[in-house]
C-alpha cells in the first residue's frame, strides 16, 4: 500500500511522521512516498522519516521524489499538505487585505481567496494524475474550498482535513474546567466557521448555556491560534461554542488594528524561525532516535490525518470531524455544500451525521460564508476574475466594491506566477 505525501518538505512533516508512527501497526509495509518541489527540504524530512521509522521498528519504506507523477503512481492515499508559493505567498495573503482595511488571514476572508486561487490548480493537477480510486486526504488550505473545487471539477474522492475542532475542544475544556479527552462536541458548519451547541461529557449532554453563564472571562492569553478571552466573551452571548476563527468575524475591526500595530505578519514570524527549525530537524535526522521540535504542527495535526487514512483503509467506521459533501446533514446549507461536521469514516468515505439547523445567531453568517466559498471555488477552477470579485463581494469582511477590486487587483498581480488559470 502506498501513501503519497505531497508537500513532505513542509515544517509539519515531523508531526506527520509521529502520526504514522502512532498507527504503524495498522499500516504494515506501507510505502511513504514523499514528494516536494523543494529538494533540500524534501531530503531533510525524508531522511528524518526513515530514521524515525527505523528507530521505532515501524515497517514503512520511505521514498523521496521531486517528480509528482512518480510520487502519485499507484498511491492509494494522496495526502496533500503544501502551500503554493510557500510562506512568502502567505505573507502577501496576510498583508494585501490589511492594506485595504480588511483582516489579513491565510484562510479567512480575502487572504483565503488568494490562497484558494493558488491551491486549486495544483490540486486539480494532482487529481488528474492520481489513480481515480485513490483518496485525496487534503490539508492544503483553504481546505473547504479546495475540497469543493476538486470534487466538483474532477469527481475525485477527496476528504478535507482540519485539526481545529480538536484544538478548539481542548481550549473550551480548559476554559470550562473539563477533561478534554472525555468531551465530545458536535462542531457543525463550515471549515474555520463551525459552532457547537451540543457537547457531551462521557456521553451525557452538558447544559452549555448554564456553563457559559457561569464562565468567568479570562484576560489575555492570546496565541496565534487561540484567543480564549474573546471566545469566552462571545460564547457567553451566543450560548454555544464558536470556532476560534469566529474572532475575525465578531472582532474584525479590533483585529485589523492589532494586526497593523503588530507590524509583522504571521508568515513573517514563521519565516524568521524556520531556518533554525530546519537546522534542528537536520541535526535530529542524524541521531539514532530523533526527537524533532514540535514547534510546527506539534499537536494532534499529524495523528488526526493518519487516523483518517486508517479509518478509510481499515473501514473503521470512526466518528471524525471532516469536510465533506453535506447531503442534508446541515439543513441550513445546500445539500451539495462542503460542510465540516462529525462523520462516520469507513471504506466508503465519510458519512456525515445529521446535525440539523445551524444556530440562529450565526445561521446567516455561515450561509454568507458558504456563498463566498462556492464562488471562490468556481473562480479558482475557471480563472475567472469576475467570479473572484463576486466571491469577495459575498464575503462578510469586505466592506464594498472598491475594496474588493483593490484587493483582487493587488492579489492577482502579486501572485501572478502561481495563477496559471488567470493568464
Ligand atoms: C490551525 C488551522 C490551520 C492553519 C494553522 C496555521 O491549525 O486549523 O488551518 O493552517 O492553524 O498555523 P500557523 O502556525 O501556520 O499560523
Ligand atoms: Mn484548519
Image (cartoon, helix red, strand yellow):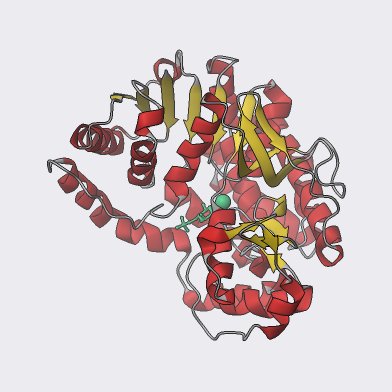
Q: Residue at x 56, y 28 (%)?
A: 312
- Please state the horizontal and vertical placement of residue 208, each as a whole percent of the image: 72, 71
Q: Position of residue 339 (x, y in %)?
A: 73, 44
Q: Is residue 355 left or right of residue 16?
A: right
Q: Kindly tell me whether residue 102 is visible in this rendering.
A: no
- Using the image, determine if residue 119 lies above or below residue 407: above
Residue 281, above or below 228: above
Q: Quadrant of the C terminus?
A: top right
Q: Nearer the viewer, residue 221 or 29?
A: 29
Give the answer, above or below, for where 243 lies relative to 73.
below
Q: Nearer the viewer, residue 231 or 379?
A: 231
Between 422 and 231, the residue placed more toward the observer is: 231
Would you identify the image quadrant in which residue 277 lies?
bottom left
Q: Is residue 279 visible?
A: yes
Residue drawn at x 50%, y 52% is: 90
Q: Residue at x 28, y 54 (%)?
A: 293
389 with respect to 74 (left or right): right
**Total tally of numbered discs in the picture:** 0
Look at the image and tell me in which quarter the N terminus lies: top left
**Residue in view at x 65 percent, y 82 percent:** 215
- The x and y percentages for residue 348 are 65, 24
Residue 55 position (above or below residue 110): above
Q: Position of residue 92 (x, y in %)?
A: 52, 55
Amino acid at each position: 500500500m502506498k501513501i503519497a505525501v505531497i508537500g513532505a518538505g513542509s515544517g509539519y512533516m515531523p508531526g506527520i511522521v509521529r502520526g504514522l508512527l502512532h498507527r504503524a501497526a495498522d499500516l504494515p509495509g506501507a510505502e511513504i512516498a514523499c514528494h516536494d518541489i523543494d529538494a533540500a527540504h524534501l531530503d531533510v524530512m525524508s531522511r528524518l522519516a526513515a530514521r524515525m521509522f527505523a528507530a521505532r521498528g515501524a515497517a514503512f519504506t520511505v521514498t523521496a521524489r521531486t517528480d509528482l507523477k512518480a510520487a502519485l503512481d499507484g498511491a492509494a492515499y494522496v495526502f496533500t499538505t503544501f502551500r503554493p508559493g510557500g510562506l512568502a505567498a502567505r505573507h502577501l495573503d496576510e498583508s494585501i487585505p490589511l492594506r485595504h482595511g480588511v483582516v489579513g488571514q491565510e484562510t479567512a476572508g480575502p487572504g483565503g481567496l488568494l490562497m484558494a486561487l493558488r491551491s486549486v490548480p495544483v490540486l486539480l493537477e494532482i487529481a488528474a494524475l492520481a489513480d481515480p480510486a485513490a483518496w485525496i486526504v487534503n490539508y492544503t488550505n483553504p481546505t473547504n474550498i479546495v475540497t469543493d473545487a476538486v470534487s466538483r471539477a474532477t469527481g475525485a474522492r477527496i476528504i478535507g482535513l482540519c485539526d481545529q475542532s480538536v484544538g478548539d475542544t481542548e481550549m473550551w475544556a480548559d476554559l470550562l474546567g473539563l477533561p478534554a479527552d472525555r468531551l465530545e462536541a458536535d462542531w457543525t458548519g463550515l471549515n474555520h466557521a463551525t459552532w457547537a451547541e451540543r457537547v457531551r461529557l462521557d456521553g451525557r449532554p452538558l447544559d452549555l448555556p448554564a456553563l457559559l453563564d457561569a464562565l468567568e472571562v479570562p484576560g489575555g492569553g492570546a496565541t496565534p491560534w487561540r484567543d480564549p478571552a474573546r471566545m469566552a466573551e462571545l460564547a457567553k452571548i451566543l450560548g454555544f461554542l464558536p470556532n476560534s476563527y469566529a474572532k475575525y468575524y465578531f472582532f474584525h475591526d479590533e483585529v485589523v488594528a492589532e494586526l497593523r500595530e503588530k507590524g509583522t505578519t504571521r508568515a513573517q514570524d514563521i519565516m524568521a524561525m524556520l531556518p533554525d527549525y530546519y537546522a534542528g530537524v537536520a541535526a535530529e535526522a542524524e541521531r539514532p532516535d530523533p526527537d524533532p521540535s514540535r514547534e510546527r504542527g506539534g499537536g494532534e495535526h499529524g495523528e488526526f490525518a493518519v487516523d483518517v487514512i486508517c479509518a478509510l483503509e481499515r473501514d473503521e467506521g470512526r466518528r471524525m470531524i471532516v469536510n465533506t459533501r453535506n447531503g442534508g446533514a446541515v439543513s441550513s446549507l445546500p445539500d451539495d455544500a462542503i460542510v465540516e461536521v462529525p462523520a462516520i469514516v469507513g471504506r466508503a468515505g465519510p458519512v456525515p451525521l445529521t446535525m440539523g439547523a445551524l444556530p440562529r445567531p450565526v445561521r446567516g453568517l455561515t450561509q454568507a460564508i458558504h456563498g463566498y466559498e462556492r464562488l471562490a471555488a468556481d473562480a479558482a477552477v475557471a480563472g475567472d476574475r469576475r467570479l473572484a470579485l463576486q466571491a469577495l463581494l459575498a464575503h462578510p469582511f469586505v466592506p464594498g466594491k472598491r475594496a474588493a477590486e483593490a484587493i483582487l487587483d493587488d492579489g492577482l498581480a502579486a501572485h501572478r506566477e502561481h495563477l496559471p488559470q488567470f493568464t
